[in-house]
Image (cartoon, rainbow, N blue to C red):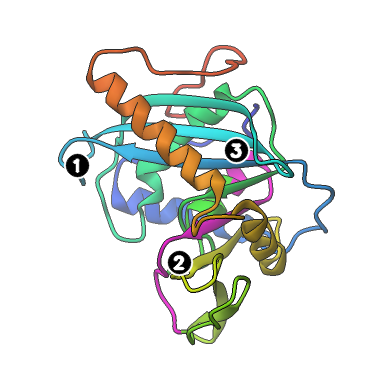
Amino acid sequence: MELQLDHPWPGTEAEALALQQRLRPLVRPGGPALGPVRTLAGLDVAYGGSHGAAADRVAAAVVVLDADTLAVVDRATAVGTAGFPYVPGLFAFRELPILAEALARIGTVPDVLLCDGQGLAHPRRFGLACHLGLLTGLPTLGVAKTPLLGSWDEPGPARGDCADVRHEGELVARVLRTQAGVKPVTVSTGHLVTLDDACELTLRAAPRYRLPETTRLADRLCRDVLAAADRGGAPRRSCPTGRARDAIGG
């Protein structure tokens, strides 16, 4: 698929902070009403190495599912290095370059992206899901295992029960129980999707387990690809649409 946003990836914390501040006003958390959602894509990154260094080996996976059956219709992967150290609040810069490579190789443009991370529930209101939304021009939401910030009440025990997460007086996410009696996930908007729609799509993608199938399948694929790369095998790539973009953009 063709990426919509092209910029150099920052090499320092100051450059990353400046890029977040520059791009944040472009995010549209609500956007137009979603049309029919026929496909959902999950994105995830697996890590090897010292867990925090710029040289850490990483593998990204994008898995596109039929929104009704949750069957896999397309997938693509990429393997490389993180290129940016772990810095709280700037975690997206470890994942976005390799995710951009995988996205550039996918042959199917999904209707909605679900990433394993935060969107507006971020100190600068610009988490991974927001940046991915601008990068692709697609409706994007974050489904995280735990809240990054804010305060909330415990939601009810039934599937679909939820509670607002507020930070500094602003609604930034919802904790959503995807299965009865299990720990809720945290859903936040990234770009071009409302929080109500984001929660509905998360439930749609999680009919049996706590985490959406988009996340589960992307997580499994990127881990398998990283293990294969570490053994010296070739990374699996599906439906390449041409020469992949360089991780720096362009």
> What is the x, y in percent for residue 232?
25, 13
Q: Is residue 167 visible?
A: yes
Residue pictured at 68% horizontal, 50% vertical: 139
Residue that badge 1 annotates: 53
Of callouts 1 and 3, the N-terminal one:
3
Q: Please state if 42 lies on the left or on the right of 68 as rendered.
A: left
Residue that badge 3 annotates: 5
The dot on residue 140 is: none
Q: Please report the bounds of the magenta region as a residue range.
A: 133-151
Please determine whether, in this image, residue 233 is positioned above or below residue 47: above
| 139, 27: nearer the viewer | 139
Residue that badge 2 annotates: 122
> What is the x, y in percent for residue 131?
53, 49
Of callouts 2 and 3, the N-terminal one:
3
Q: Secondary structure at mark 3?
A: loop
Tell us which disc is closer to us: 1 or 3: 1
Tell us which disc is closer to us: 2 or 3: 2
> What is the x, y in percent for residue 194?
71, 65
Please determine whether, in this image, residue 59 is positioned above or below residue 121: above
